[in-house]
Image (tube, helix red, strand yellow):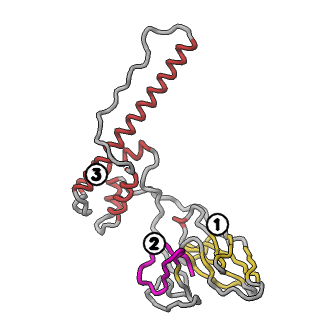
Amino acid sequence: MRTATFDSGLRFGDANLRWGDPSYLLEPGDPGYVADPTSASFPPSQPPTHRKAMPKSDAIKSKDADFVAQLLTFKNNIGAYATLLGLTPAQVSAQAADADYFNQVTCCQDIAEKHAQQRTAWKNYIRDGGDVPASGAPVAPTYPSTATAVAPGVEKRFRDLARLIKSHPSYNTGIGEALGIEGNSVSAPDLSTFKPTLTLELSGGQVFVRWGWQGKSQFLDLLEIQVDRGSGYTLLTYDSTPNYLDTNTIPSTAQKWTYKAIFRVSDSRVGQWSDEVSITVGG
């Protein structure tokens, strides 16, 4: 059994999907598992093969000046692609308004900060004395013409719009580059010494295995988890979503279960096995 989220590629109607808090997907060996070829947990014997495209950095710029330039690039170029990508005039106009207002707000902030620096320098000059020139005192700044105000949340709206565009069947990376919404390709790091970190806890009478991607999810596909219940290690699961609930029945007498894991990319293991972690169950 593995935990499930709405954004993990699972579909409603999956015979092995159980929605709740938490939601989870039944896997072979779990009570109630159905050997349905259309289920996300079928077939059980081999990990799914993943073929990722070259990872890319976040397409949305983090620095304000870069984000302004990105918004304006999109605004100035979307006209040629709006119909092809199924955008309405209202969507195009809303993005243009966001771009213009955020540009105006950012410009005003930059001017105000520079004016504040000038005021501080003049104040210090006056306080410290010396030959004070007859001219050179700060003058009130001139701000750019006012743009129509928009509601907060410009970045979220732009992310949502970019996501909508990229889901359109007519979209391609060339269009994305013209619109400024494609991130830069990121080279994979050296994963030879990288290894998972596991922690265990009992949750509702079952073992909950906590794990995460450790900031490298874009370069990894799966986590292979193995468990030793006293007779040697056996495969527990191939998990694609952080954290896993082991639904194996807890024994009536005390027993030590030990877990280890390793990351996978496509059909191959990468990096090192995690440190072994153990927990006492039953009794």
Residue displayed at 51% across by 84% down: 41
Q: Residues within 10 Å of mark 1 (few under 14, many from 20)?
A: few
Q: Between disc 1 and disc 3, whose residue precedes?
A: 3
Q: Is 113 placed left or right of 204 in the picture?
A: left
Query: Under tag 3, what secondary structure?
Result: helix
Q: Residues within 10 Å of mark 2 (few under 14, many from 20)?
A: few
Q: Residues within 10 Å of mark 3 (few under 14, many from 20)?
A: some
Residue 187 at x, y percent in the picture: 52, 59
Residue range (magenta): 1-23
Residue 150 at x, y percent in the picture: 32, 46
Q: Which residue is mark 2?
A: 6
Report which quarter residue 177 is drawn in: bottom left
Q: Which residue is mark 3?
A: 94
Whole-angstrom CA distance, mark 1 to mark 3, is 47 Å
What amino acid is labelled 2 in the image?
Phe
Residue displayed at 59% across by 90% down: 29
Q: Which secondary structure dominates the residues rendered in magenta?
A: loop
Marks 1 & 3, CB-CB < 8 Å contact: no
Locate the N terminus by quadrant. bottom right
Q: Is 260 placed left or right of 99 in the picture?
A: right
Q: Which residue is mark 1?
A: 192
Residue displayed at 45% across by 70% down: 7
Report which quarter residue 92 is drawn in: bottom left
Marks 1 & 2, CB-CB < 8 Å contact: no
Please name whichever residue, 124 or 44, is drawn nearer the observer in this view of the structure. 124
Of marks 1 and 3, the one in the foreground: 3
Is residue 14 highlighted in magenta? yes
